[in-house]
Image (spheres, grey):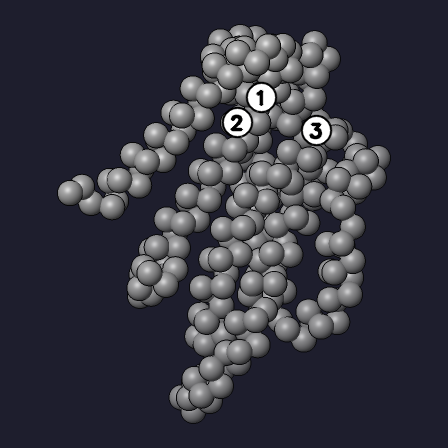
Amino acid sequence: MPERSVLVPVASLGVLGAFLLTWELLPPALGVPQDIIPPASDLWFEMAPMWCFENLPAHILSTGSMALLGFVLGDAGGHALGLLPAWERVLSPYILASQIAPKIAFAPLLIMWFGFNAWPEQIVTILIVFFPILVNVLPSMRVADRDLVSQARAYSMSKDQVLGKVPFTSSVPNLMAGLGIGATLAVIGITVGEVVGSQIGLGYLITYGQSPANTAMIFNPIILLTLIAIALHAAVAAVEVRVLHYVPRSLH
């Protein structure tokens, strides 16, 4: 009997194949116009013109790199503040307020302040990624093993060394969980910024495809954005396996 590690990807590919076949055959069979839901093959045929005439590689590179940058900066800010619980208590009302407000509502203001450049979309991405990282790191800092802290101090470690050896290390599992969420949210954040006000990126192509009512041109960036999010999440998962190698696989 094939191992489970082989069966899982085969089953996943089977589900994908069934989904694409249904997408290809069902809309025409139901008489759905192509400008509403195009067959899956139309997306493939539209990809070549987008690659040649719309400079699709540049849009993919812009969105991917900006999502990665926003992810890294949002992670750095959330983790840094999470390591300082006292400051978090002071700033928590403002942090909560920034998360309650819809991020897309900030985009027009950011465009007015910074113009049509990378700053608005980058700030939106950082805001979206920041909070999940923070809320995953803080609990581990609050429940750090006090016995280990006392033992570290008994070895004459400085305050910074104790912070690095005990609470910081204990925050890593929760941090990795937050990173998995932040990886996908980074793509959402960068897309919001590009849709609202940008001249490059996959989000911009989604808006651009609305004018000629080219549904296939709208679907293709959505699929590519999904693939970028999957790639980021897979990269985080790979790092998690390496960093948390001491944790049984069944537990993470």
Mark 1 or 3, closer to the camera: 1
Q: Where is residue 248? Give x, y as percent.
A: 31, 64
SS assignment at label 2: helix
Which residue sits furthest front?
30
Quickly name the residue at label 2: 223
Closest to the observer, 189 or 45: 45
Q: Earlier in the sequence, mark 1 or mark 3?
A: 3
Using residue 190 as the reference point, say whether residue 93 is left or right of it: right
Residue where numbered disc 3 is placed: 195
Measure the alpha-carbon separation of dots 3 and 2: 15 Å
Q: Amino acid at mark 3?
A: Val
Q: Eyeballing the image, is 48 above or below 87?
A: above
In the picture shown, does residue 242 fall above or below 226?
below
Q: What's under tag 1, amino acid-wise?
A: Phe
* Residue assigned mark 1: 219
Q: Residues within 10 Å of mark 1 (few under 14, many from 20)?
A: many
Q: Choose the circle earlier in sequence order: 3 or 2.
A: 3
Q: Quadrant of residue 202?
A: top right
In the rendered structure, are the residues bearing label 1 and label 2 in contact, judged by CB atoms less than 8 Å apart? yes
